[in-house]
Amino acid sequence: MLEAREAGGVRPLSSVLKTLQLLDLLGKSDRPMKLMELAAASGSSRATTYQKLLTLMEAGWLEQTDQGSYRLSLHAALVGETALVQANLGERFAHVMQELVLQVGETASLAVLNGNCVRLVRRVEAQQVAVRADVKVGTLLSLNDSSSGRVLTAFSSPAYREMLQRQGAVLARPAMLKDIAARGYAVSEGTDTPGVQSVAMPVFDAKGACIAALSLVTPASRFDPDKLIGSLREAVQTLSQLK
């Protein structure tokens, strides 16, 4: 990338890079940050930092809390979801999911956050009878009832969960989300998709952020998470190592 810039004789705009640095700082924080904190972390004056924050707010990337701190807006989350789609996440993970399905004999699904819902971006059906013909790539699941939705919210930051609730999202109970984060997986009761149950685990990126949920889905009549967790854990560990 550097060679391309040098060859073309074009340099990146340092002012833009310094402004985007604030997005990186807030993206790594699990809480909103104050002007003084952001100025110190970015090595800029308060006046310059404030101007950059106003620019990002005007563009829709940030919003200010009642206490005067700054946090990422939902726009940032939506752009992140689009990045996952454009990166062809489902295709890159396909071979791991196929191996998982062959190993356990059950259907595997990959899901990401999509606004106030969860969207399936990849699904590999088991050879035995399909779980639900109407559950396919693009299907939206709930944040509070689906195992993938529970995992994606349990492993998101408190600030992000607060943002989802402000947008009208219904989340699982805080105690449940805390328990899911502690044990590393979530199960569904079958209310989101009647007759079907699932167990899901988080997939992390190189920075340790949860970017997707991988789940194994079975008819409720044969659902036994204890038989699925070991294989599912191995699969998410492999996915988390993919670049």
Image (tube, rainbow, N blue to C red):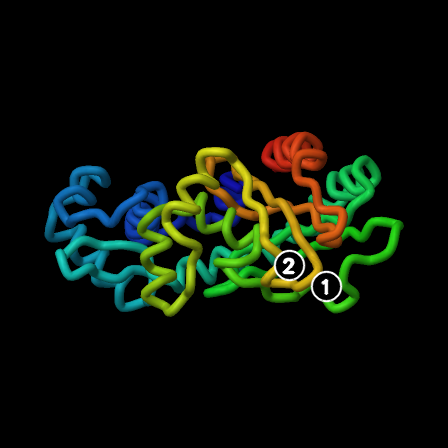
In the displayed structure image, the side of residue 233 where residue 145 appears, left or right: left
SS at mark 2? strand
Q: Nearer the viewer, residue 128 or 118?
A: 128
Position of residue 152 measured from the top left corner of the image (x, y, whole percent): 50, 49
- Residue drawn at (53%, 42%) of the image: 1
Image quadrant holding the C terminus, namely: top right
SS at mark 1? loop
CB atoms of marks 1 and 2 within 8 Å:
yes
- Which quarter of the picture shows residue 227? top right
- Residue drawn at (24%, 49%) of the image: 32
- Residue drawn at (69%, 51%) of the image: 109
Q: How many marks?
A: 2
Q: Which residue position holds label 1?
A: 136
Position of residue 118 measured from the top left corner of the image (x, y, whole percent): 55, 60
- Which quarter of the picture shows residue 238? top right
Q: Earlier in the sequence, mark 1 or mark 2?
A: 2
